[in-house]
Structures are given as structure tokens and as C-alpha cells.
Image: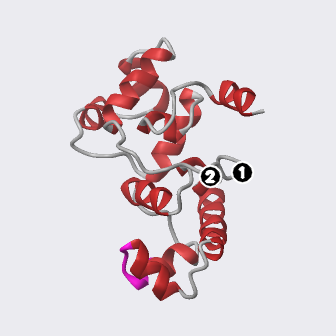
Amino acid sequence: MNTQIVSHFGKRLKKLIFEKELESVSQFAQKAGICRSEAYALLNRENLPSFARIVMLSDFFSCSADYLLGLAPYRKETFSRSCRQFGEGLQIAIEQNRGTRYLFCLQLDFSESMVAAWYNGKTLPTSKNIVRIAQYLKCSIDSILGKNSLQNISEQENNEK
């Protein structure tokens, strides 16, 4: 799963840079506020950036984090707006799925202390874990962040048709 997401991420990033008419990796890095070596690493599909960096890049390109990671098949323009804290969104998503934090930890094999740190805003999950979380909760990453309403993915797709 992770290598496929890294591959999708690199491809989507190249496409978005082209669409934004950025002429070089250096120009992309400068405008996005990242160092050039990080930009090259992202484009060469060496690894996924941190979750915070994914959120920043999705805001920079005005697209969803789900599209950037290859979880959404098409680009839906989003505009940067204040997001709720990740922990708050996660708590709401778990409750809307009629789950408990305990079952969430058990079924995804996360430690309770790690999830508590996410709830309290002390840390963020890795990019790989945020993908697992969204798939488990059957919702988009942007829904958890509060960029769009929290509904499951099949409901979102039906509403967009």
C-alpha cells in the first residue's frame, strides 16, 4: 500500500506543478516554502512527506489531500480555510462511525497513548497512518480536517454526481 501511495503522490505532485505553471523544481520549492532537496525527494518518489506537509501542499495547490495522495480519482478545488484540529476531527469521525477510541486503537493496532496524543494535538499521525485512518473510517482526509463536511466516501461521491 505505501509504495503505491508514494508513487501516486509523486505523479500527482508533478502534474500539479505543471498545472500551476511553475518552471522549475527550484521555483516550486521557493513558492511552496520548502527546501530544494525536499522538493526533489518528493518528486523522485523517495518517501511521503509528513502529514503537516501534505496539508500545506494541498493548500498550496488548492486541492484535496485525498487527491494529492492518490485516494481521490479527480481533482476537486479546495480553498485554504481554517481547519479544525486533527484530534477533534478524528474524535468526531470515530463517533459518527458509532465507534469508540478503544475499538479504533484495537482494530488499527495503534497504542492508546499515541491516539491520545493525536486527540490532544500533541502529535500528528504519519502520512501512512492517516491514509489507514481515512480508509478505516470510510471518509476523506479533508473531512477529518474539517475542510469539507464529514460524511463517508460513498455519500460524497453520490453528492458530487
Q: Amino acid at mark 1?
A: Tyr
Q: Which residue is mark 2?
A: 67
**Compared to 57, does 156 lie above or below?**
above
Q: Secondary structure at mark 1?
A: loop
The residues colored magenta run 33-38
Q: Is residue 133 visible?
A: no
Q: Amino acid at mark 2?
A: Tyr
Residue 77: x percent and y percent?
Answer: 60, 51
Q: Is residue 72 visible?
A: yes
Magenta stretch contains residue 14: no
Instruction: Report how far apart the C-alphas of labels 2 and 1 lie in the structure.
Output: 7 Å
* Residue at position x 56%, y 76% in the image: 43
Check disc 1 and report the residue beneath it: 74
Please determine whether, in this image, residue 36 is positioned above or below residue 50: below
Query: Does the residue at mark 2 contact the one at mark 1 (Cβ under 8 Å)?
Result: yes
Q: Looking at the image, which is closer to me, 23 or 9? A: 23
